[in-house]
Amino acid sequence: MTLHVIDSHTEGEPTRVVLEGGPDLGNGSLAERAQRFAARHDAFRRAVINEPRGFDALVGALLCPPSEPDCVTGVIFFNNVGNLGMCGHATIGTAATLAHLGRIAPGQHRFDTPVGVVTVDLKSPNEVTVENVASYRHRRAVCLDVPGLGQVTGDVAWGGNWFFLSPDAPCPLEHTHIGQLTEAASRVRRTLVENGVTGADGAEIDHVEFFGPSPTPEVPSRNFVLCPGGAYDRSPCGTGTSAKLACLAAEGRLAPGEVWVQESIIGSRYEAHYTPGTEGAIIPKVTGRAYVCADTRLIRHPDDPFADGIV
């Protein structure tokens, strides 16, 4: 089997858009089709994302027909351990990929995702603003006793995925400390599970974000984000930035329309702002840059012992 894919990176974080060769997921909403994808086609996900064709930081974007008639495409996001509800960097990467292919022109377009419709504003072939799903803070100042770290306090927030956001990083937020930050964030995530701390309706909190001041004077924040599969986010994380805006808005520290610059652990940046939503939620808008890296075909040979990826 041969799959046509295009790879890009958004502020350093990779996206692989599947153009041809994906499974038939039938009809229904994107949420229903994402459930079928997870239940019936996990070997496909592993083949696209895992080694030897991929690696742990890669996020896949499977294009499919939208269920909403005013959307230009549907897209299901996935990584090395399963589906993602929404992915900000991959949405930006998908928009840049569609622009590269000549499928969309500069202007606003709507993408259908498993967690709702998002709007992308293609400002140039490489610069995209994503109007994300409604985001909100679910719990404030949750205190955890984390083995090896002591007390860690953070907010639980939704930005298209569930996040635990904490200022209690165990070391400076610098690239040289990625190993230590990864281990610490993994411990926080395990402690969340052990203590029964969840998002709304018992949803798993599968992203952990440490944040603190940036070494760049004009930038208010740098973050480190641990993704569900154990890789760190090279970008400032679009859904994590959305969750961060929700927390800032809830604290009265960021006004509607005020620009927030979020820097990643490798120094790349998003610019973001929000408009008020309903019932205490906000509508985040996140701007970043994406660049196409490769246009290629993946081959799954029937005799290949790792045709479905290395688990």
Image: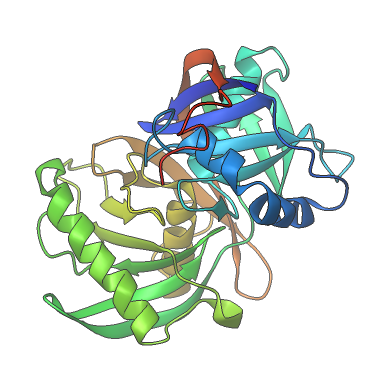
Residue 70: x %, y % from top left: 86, 38
Q: Is residue 57 above or below residue 37?
A: above
The structure residue drawn at horizontal position 27% and vertical position 64%, both measured from the top left corner, is 186
Scheme by which the image is coloured: rainbow
* Residue that sits furthest to the front in the current view: 303
> Quarter-wise, where is residue 135 in the image?
bottom right
Residue 65: x %, y % from top left: 82, 36
Residue 41: x %, y % from top left: 66, 46
Which one is nearer the viewer's eye here, 252 or 210?
210
Q: Quadrant of the N terminus?
A: top right
The structure residue drawn at horizontal position 65% and vertical position 64%, both measured from the top left corner, is 277
> Quarter-wise, where is residue 5 in the image?
top right
Q: Is residue 103 above or below residue 45?
A: above
Residue 31 in view here: yes
Residue 116 in view here: no
Residue 139: x %, y % from top left: 45, 81
Count how many numbered circles sit on residues in the image. Answer: 0
> Quarter-wise, where is residue 67 in the image?
top right
Going by the image, does 136 lie left or right of 150? Answer: right
Which one is nearer the viewer's eye here, 64 or 81?
81
Going by the image, does 2 lie left or right of 183? Answer: right
Going by the image, does 37 lie left or right of 70? Answer: left
Which one is nearer the viewer's eye here, 224 or 109?
224
Going by the image, does 259 lie left or right of 299? Answer: left
